[in-house]
Each structure stands twice: as C-alpha cells, then as structure tokens.
Image: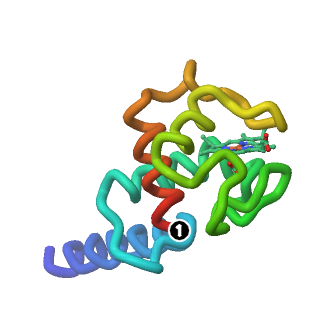
Amino acid sequence: MQAACLVAGVMLIMAGCSQQDNRPETRKQQQTPAVFQSSQKFAELCAACHGVRARGGVGPDLTVSRFKYGKDRASIKKSILEGRPGGMPAFGAHIKPEDAAALADYLLSL
Ligand code: HEC
C-alpha cells in the first residue's frame, strides 16, 4: 500500500514537471492565474504566427516596448478582437472580450 502511494506520488510529480516544460516562458515574474491561462491560450492561438515566446515569426515580435497600434490594454484588445490590416486575423468570433483582455495583460507582462 505504501509503495503504491509512493509510486503514485512520484508519477504525479513527474506529470507536473513535464507539464511545466511544455508551456511558454513564464518565469520572468509571478503571474496571476488569468495571465497564466492566457499564456496557454497564446500558445494555442497565437504562437503559430507570433512564436511560442511571442518573439515574432509571421507576425511581429510582441515583446518589444513599442507596438505599431499601441501597447496598452485597449489597443491590444482591439488588435486581437478586430484584427489588423497587415495580416492579423480578428479573433472576435472565437474568443470572449475578457479573454482578449487577459491576453493583453499577458503580453504586457512579457
Ligand atoms: C495568421 C497569423 C497570426 C495569428 C494567428 C495571430 N497574429 Fe497577431 N499579428 C499578425 C500579423 C501579421 C500582425 C501585424 C499586423 C499589421 O502590422 O497590420 C499581427 C499583429 C498583432 C498585434 C499588434 C502588434 C502591434 O505592433 O501593434 C497584436 C497585439 C497581436 N497581433 C496579437 C495576437 C494575439 C494575442 C494572437 C492570438 C489570439 C494573434 N496575434 C494571432 C499575425 C497573426
């Protein structure tokens, strides 16, 4: 019985570790759960174009200090929900405004 618990415990720890390895860089600062969830959402929806760590690819680097369309919560939210003419798709039909706001907070935390 004890051995079984130990094995289960070790497996739990290992599962925790491998999960940590898969997620984007989040160690820079303590993040709120909402921001952490957004980092996962970013990996899912945005990383294909902006890179896993938002450092750019097809889409621009989103870790820079100045954004073309403004680096503030409202402007970023607008970029996400309505898209931008240079190839940024509108996500308004796919994600909720509050998720877009949380994604904006995530980008502002990078
Ligand atoms: C199909 C590729 C693609 C996907 C997917 C994508 N983007 Fe973009 N994104 C772009 C491109 C290209 C631009 C540049 C648009 C322009 O300059 O007009 C951009 C611009 C932006 C901007 C504005 C940057 C600035 O300088 O003002 C933000 C913010 C942004 N994207 C966030 C996101 C987020 C968050 C997601 C995921 C929900 C996402 N993008 C998904 C391609 C993409």
Residue 86's x, y, as percent? Answer: 83, 37
Q: In the displayed structure, does residue 13 sit left or right of residue 89?
A: left
Q: Which residue is mark 1?
A: 110
Of residues 26 and 2, the one nearer the viewer is: 26
Please determine whether, in this image, residue 22 is positioned above or below residue 83: below
Q: Residue at x 57, y 50 (%)?
A: 42
Q: Quadrant of the N terminus?
A: bottom left
User: Left or right: 86 with respect to 51?
Assistant: right
Tell me what residue is drawn at x 23 percent, y 73 percent.
Answer: 4
Q: Which quadrant of the figure has residue 54? A: bottom right
**How many other residues sit within 10 Å of disc 1, few (<14), some (14-19) or many (≥20)?**
some
Q: Quadrant of residue 36?
A: bottom left
**Residue at point 35%, 67% (across, down):** 31
Along the viewing direction, whichever of 29 and 25 lies nearer the viewer: 29
Which three-letter amino acid code belongs to the residue tagged 1? Answer: Leu
x then y, percent, for residue 68:
72, 51
Is residue 45 placed above or below 35 in the rendered structure?
above
Image point (62%, 68%), residue name: 65
Front residue of 62/40: it is 62
**Hey, which residue is sitting farthest left in the picture?**
1
